[in-house]
Amino acid sequence: MNNFELYNPVNYVFGKGQIEQLKDLVPNKKILIAYGGGSIFKNGVYDQVKAALPTHDVVEFGGIEPNPRYETLMKAVEIIRKEKIEFILAVGGGSVIDGVKFISAAVNYEGDAAEILRKRILFKDVSKVIPFGTVLTLPATGSEMNSGAVVTIEATQEKLTLGGSALFPVFSIVDPTVIISLPKRQLQNGVVDAFTHVMEQYLTYTHDALLQDRISESILQTLIEIGPEVVENPSDYKLASNFVWSATMALNGLIQKGVPSDWATHMIGHELTALYEIDHARTLAIIAPSLYKVMFETKKDKLAQYGQRVWNITGNSTEEIAEKAIEKTVEFFHTMGMKTKISENTENYENTADFIVSRFEERGWKAMGEKQNITPEKVREIVEMSY
Ligand code: NZQ
Ligand code: ZN
């Protein structure tokens, strides 16, 4: 097992009716409530938030889009500087929470805030960022309990990451009943995003971190068990609560400790969203199966372990079980409403591989994956196999 540090300061507040806890969790300071395109007004979440904060001095900032835009977030940064806001409350899905992480980092950043993304500045000093809490409305990203974020620069169609230990939420309120109003498409996305987060940290090579593997496998099994049902019946509390907790556990840092990780599916997937606005989770369902095939030699032992333990696949050889495990994964993505080819999600995709490869080369991303053997040539193969 690799050495590790486990640091996660998020006060994670889970369950029915927990939004009212905001009254004790939000400091009595001037706050900004940040939200997205307005779903919170339709499903009653906004009313619950306001009811919990009757006497707070509140400024509101709406319109953070899915795949949050740097250009939009900078408007909130200006408001915070002007209004001297001391705490931010993010109310929404991964996009709103990620957007707030960027805002939190950018307010006191000296220099061009786009550098935060382009140079991937790490934020470690909590005194330099604006503290924030979250009310999660969409289980998927784990952003409610991690310190990472993804922001798109509209002008250049770049989807880039930021993070650092200062960017954990102070608290996150996670009430599983808020998923009732989610469109089926977003519920499907949430299951597949969470599933792929586990795969990025688990599906590498076999190692001796036994517990991490077992935790990862149990999250995958839980998502396989409840995923198809929860998208049909999000008001079932047993399904909803297990879904939400699985999504958080998939990317709150725990299963990544002491083990290798990949993340190339995400890096390539982000480009598909930047280019074609394909939903984040749907890009993962497109790329992951091709990546497992192209990187088969590196991953086959772990694919076989995954096949045996998660899908109960039997076979005569590692290769046979590993291949069946990829097929099962694709079947699961289809069950979850994913279309697993680029051509099924967008038109005019012929230059995608050229574009992504040259972008990765410009950024110096020449050796990705758990063994740093996903080279630009491999990226090309993966993307072309996904057409
Ligand atoms: O904007 P509103 O009106 O709120 O509507 C949203 C949005 O249209 C809607 N929605 C959210 N909660 C709802 C709801 N509609 C009805 N009822 C509710 N309870 O759902 C739509 C999608 O929301 P969004 O926040 O974009 O989805 P998600 O949570 O999947 O976040 C995706 C973003 O997170 C990034 C992705 O790249 C993408 O930009 N990721 C962040 C990660 C992280 N911070 O660790 C890791 C992930 O891998 C991912 O990259
Ligand atoms: Zn993801």
Image: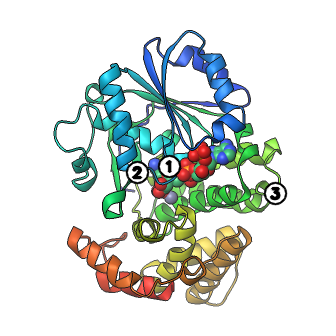
Among numbered discs 1 and 3, the one appearing first in the sequence = 1
Question: Is 242 left, or right, of 130 in this rendering?
Answer: right
Residue 355 picture quarter:
bottom left
Q: Residues within 10 Å of mark 3 (few under 14, many from 20)?
A: few
Residue 369 picture quarter:
bottom left
Colouring of the image: rainbow
| Residues at circles 2 and 1 in contact by the CB criterion of under 8 Å | yes
Task: Give the secondary structure at mark 2.
Answer: loop
Q: Residues within 10 Å of mark 2 (few under 14, many from 20)?
A: many
**Whether residue 275 is visible:** yes
Q: Which residue is mark 3?
A: 232
Percent of width and height locating residue 147: 40, 42
Q: Residue at x 41, y 71 (%)?
A: 268
Question: Is 40 left, or right, of 361 in this rendering?
Answer: right
Question: Is 254 left, or right, of 117 in this rendering?
Answer: right
User: What amino acid does circle 3 point to?
Assistant: Glu
Percent of width and height locating residue 267: 39, 66
**Whether residue 142 is visible:** no
Task: Give the secondary structure at mark 1.
Answer: loop
Q: Which residue is mark 2?
A: 69
